[in-house]
Amino acid sequence: MSERIVVAGAGLAGSLMAVLLARRGYDVQVYERRGDMRREPVGRGRSINLALSTRGLHALGVAGLREQVLASGIPMHGRMIHSLDGGTELQRYSTDPGEHLNSVSRHDLNVLLLNEAEKAGVRIHFHEKCLGVEPGRLEVLNEETRAVRSVDAPRILGADGAYSAVRAWMQRRDRFDYHQNYLDWGYKELHIPPRGNGRHRIFTNALHIWPRHDFMLIALPNLDGSFTCTLFLPFEGPQSFAALKTDDDVLRFFTRQFPDAVAHMPTLVEDYRHNPVSSLVYIRCAPWHVEDRVALLGDACHAVVPFYGQGMNAAFEDCAALDECIDALAPDWQKVFETYAGMRKPNTDALADLSLRNFVEMRGRVVSPLYLAKKKADDVLHRLFPDHWSSLYTMVTFRRIPYAEAVERARRQDLALGLAAGAGGLLLAGLALRFTSRFR
Amino acid sequence: MSERIVVAGAGLAGSLMAVLLARRGYDVQVYERRGDMRREPVGRGRSINLALSTRGLHALGVAGLREQVLASGIPMHGRMIHSLDGGTELQRYSTDPGEHLNSVSRHDLNVLLLNEAEKAGVRIHFHEKCLGVEPGRLEVLNEETRAVRSVDAPRILGADGAYSAVRAWMQRRDRFDYHQNYLDWGYKELHIPPRGNGRHRIFTNALHIWPRHDFMLIALPNLDGSFTCTLFLPFEGPQSFAALKTDDDVLRFFTRQFPDAVAHMPTLVEDYRHNPVSSLVYIRCAPWHVEDRVALLGDACHAVVPFYGQGMNAAFEDCAALDECIDALAPDWQKVFETYAGMRKPNTDALADLSLRNFVEMRGRVVSPLYLAKKKADDVLHRLFPDHWSSLYTMVTFRRIPYAEAVERARRQDLALGLAAGAGGLLLAGLALRFTSRFR
């Protein structure tokens, strides 16, 4: 009989991990609090599409699912910046057209992974809420029958998201460091429907941004010709969710701030009224595992804010890393979990910081002259030294360099660029001095 | 009928708060998970004595209990530093003999507060575990009868300690920032018994420290002639709890590291074997209240590591601050809780940092020449400008300046001292130059 591994959570990370484990011959049992999304209607307001990039694609490739997923992705080659006057400008992500993001449907991707997991022999138990962990066992509550039972679980992987029950159990144990922080901004999902002919109303192959410094609207394309928009806005203050009280307030705010978007949002007022405001949390914890029995992956141990588009990519990278560690070190599970956590934790910590910083960039700095000059310099240097110079964005999004290493490389590059700019300045000053002195 | 306030936790903060509220005429109901400590034997290993100082004494004074508590406190006028060779040196806390710490028994102080609370009309319910909060109600489980009931609780104060159930409920709500961090050090309580004649074996009126850089032993005097010792040691590593496996290991370690202490610890090996190793956690969270319904105080919202001796003092200061806000703003409870949290949170954040930094100081820096020179300079300047110059330690321990302000004042003083030292150095250099040039 094959060794059993229990996965808590059948979201993106849990179901990809289940596929990878089943392919290795383990008896994989997945427990999911929600019902089967393949049979139930989709709830409103959960992030509908996601930006899949190199790291996530690599992990899907390990499971042999890369091409299948890419087939229903929409390439986004750059950011389309929408200014207040309705003008637009496309900022390409890369000089290489192969380096683009892919807008994918969370729902479709999750369904694909659930199907693949079951094909690979995984048993998925829905409506089973994790209550706690005991030595070698997982306690679950069936939310339909209300029956509590304890299932055999020598190895438990907590892939149960930012509000992880497995992590909550770990938090009640001794010596578990835990941080959860909320932003003062919330978000609300809105909608741009397709044209009558099923085509997109605005440019398809871009991630659209309406940066307004303290807040922003973004839009990602869907396959059906629609766009999913997300409004990021402070909870409180003069321009905030709290300040938009009536339909009129909403319409006036959008008309003033996003005039070219509002023209494409016929259901704006209804969507605004019905869709919830969600909060933005980021989470850090340590350690990621309990002995050789329990380990965490994905949002359960490192939920980040969504502004680098790396949450899912990092979670998939966890799956590939854990799969690698299992390959090299199983059945020494203590070693497997230790090595996996050691590889990942410094990098997801770095990603947490990057994601926070990118919120400032997306809201405003993408339109600042200094940002644009720096981007230009990075592009030129990358063309000159393609193997030695990549912008931080490129390293994070289109390479698999560990996040912390990407941050460190970018820091060294910026230092070099600063020195070069300084030296260039001195040279110019020297030439100017010489030139002027000749005519004195 | 008077307005009801429910307090979760009958520890030090909860019972002092209950006294203050009852004195204001509220119907105060306290729910405590443990049994009544006045009727049950004391558990091993909980911190037995505490250093009470100005802030705590002030709050006790507001409740009219200052003199009563001081009567059974033992003044500690300074740190008695024990070096490796058994030599000792007393470092006085202050040039003013009235400025000293008071070693008080946690158990006796808590019993006194419970008695005073009941005298003031407070109802204390023991063995009642808080399960959660509902609008206007508190859900409790009686741990003797196993009955769950929901009690009327329009106002709830969570004074239920570092592992607060009220805070755990708040953490499950949206937009609650929460941090818990553990040190890599643990602690174990040990014992120096009285002499045959009931006198203390080592100098009574001091907080004894055996600083050994990576670890330390401390001892506080008890009224019965004994000392309670606490060993702070890393959990893992060459010199750690993990490394002390046998009785022989323990004896050898103590004989080498604390030769003069071990001579007074006849039950060392047994105590070491029986007393648990406890961990050291610090906790931050925000917000401290939920609307006008629930607020936290003491360790529940700001547990700190014990190295500044300010945990209880800060918790008592919370009680006095909340009492002040009630005096000024009740029954506008939203305003009461907001103002209280606004007053306290920046200061307990500052205390958290101070307490961490003081661990480094206590373990080692108290014996460094630079530390001693700085202490000397502070003492001299305090004598010269008593109203304008106080060391950080004095401001934290013997004043009621808000913690954050004390930190800021100390920073400005250090800057001035640095500038003065720099100017003095320049002056000397100038004189030397002049002197040497004359003889050139």
Image (cartoon, coloured by chain):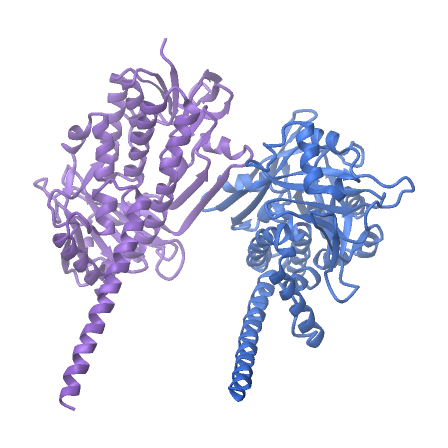
Chain colours: A blue, B purple
Q: Is residue B346 above or below residue B32?
A: below
Direction from residue A290 to residue A69 in the image, left or right? right
Where residue A412 sits, quadrant-wise, is bottom right
Quadrant of the drawing holding the C terminus of chain B: bottom left
Q: Which residue is at a point 57% across and 78% down the rendered structure image?
A: A424
Residue A399 spot, x, y in % from top left: 69, 64
* Residue A364 visible in the shown view: yes
Q: Which residue is at a point 14% across and 87% down the rendered structure image?
A: B438
Direction from residue A195 to residue B437 in the image, left or right? left
Q: Nearer the viewer, residue A68 or B142?
A: A68
Q: Which residue is at a point 23% across and 27% down the rendered structure image?
A: B62
Residue A322 spot, x, y in % from top left: 65, 56
Residue that lies at the very extreme toward the left in this rendered image: B197
Residue B351 spot, x, y in % from top left: 33, 45
Q: Nearer the viewer, residue A187 or B357?
A: A187
Residue that lies at the very extreme toward the right in this rendered image: A197
Residue that lies at the very extreme toward the top in this rendered image: B1
Quadrant of the drawing holding the N terminus of chain B: top left
Residue that lies at the very extreme toward the front in this rendered image: A440
Where residue A384 sits, quadrant-wise, is bottom right
Q: Which residue is at a point 64% across and 59% down the rendered structure image?
A: A325
Q: Is residue B84 above or below residue B137?
A: below
* Residue B306 visible in the shown view: no
Q: Nearer the viewer, residue A319 or B319?
A: B319
Residue A186 spot, x, y in % from top left: 61, 39
Q: Is residue B86 above or below residue B310?
A: below
Direction from residue B296 to residue B275 in the image, left or right? left
Where residue B91 sits, quadrant-wise, is bottom left
Q: Nearer the viewer, residue B339 or A100?
A: B339
